[in-house]
Image: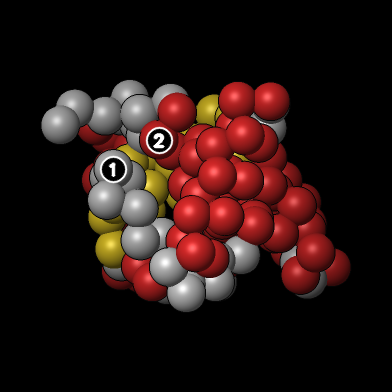
Amino acid sequence: MSTNGFLLDTTVLIDIFRGKENTVSLITKLAEELPLAVSAVTIGEIYSGIRETEQKRVQEFLDSLVLYPIDGVISHKAGIYRREYRKKGITLGLLDCFIAATAVEFNLTLVTKNLRHFPMPELSIIEH
């Protein structure tokens, strides 16, 4: 399956900002192949826990990414994901559902450390 780029999950961004070499190396390699992107939801997650000393560097990095906003289509898909998995006894965070819906809607490969948060079979994932 081809992809339009790589959607970076919050966990991966945190590792980049903290200088984890294996994550930085992976993301550098992926950036050579296709665009790196972020969901508007992920930006909110990052800023809710950002360290004061990281703000300028974090913003510069986020500005270098393609930003995917949340719209009605994404919101609809996210709500359906959460509802359908809840019926199966699986509780998913709504923010993760927004991220998954963004990746699926725009044909992006999600790069994450939390595979269990994203059980959707139609989702292309690189677990790191």
Q: Nearer the viewer, residue 32 or 8?
A: 8
Question: Which kind of residue does numbered mark 1 sit on?
Answer: Glu
- Residue 36, position as x, y percentages in the image: 43, 36
Q: Nearer the viewer, residue 73 or 69?
A: 73
Residue lying at 64% horizontally and 55% vertically, measured from the top left: 95
Q: Which mark is residue 122?
A: 1
Against 74, is 79 above or below? below
- Mark found first going from the N terminus, 2 or 1: 2
Quadrant containing the C terminus in the rendered view: bottom left
10 Å crowding of disc 2: few (<14), some (14-19), many (20+): some
Is the C-beta separation of discs 2 and 1 under 8 Å?
Answer: yes
Residue lying at 54% horizontally and 28% vertically, measured from the top left: 66
Could you say whether the residue bearing mark 2 is in a helix, strand or loop? helix
Relative horizontal placement of residue 1, taking residue 111 as reference (left or right): left
On the image, numbered disc 2 is attached to which residue? 104
Q: Is residue 32 visible?
A: yes
Quadrant containing the N terminus in the rendered view: top left
Residue 46, image quadrant: bottom right
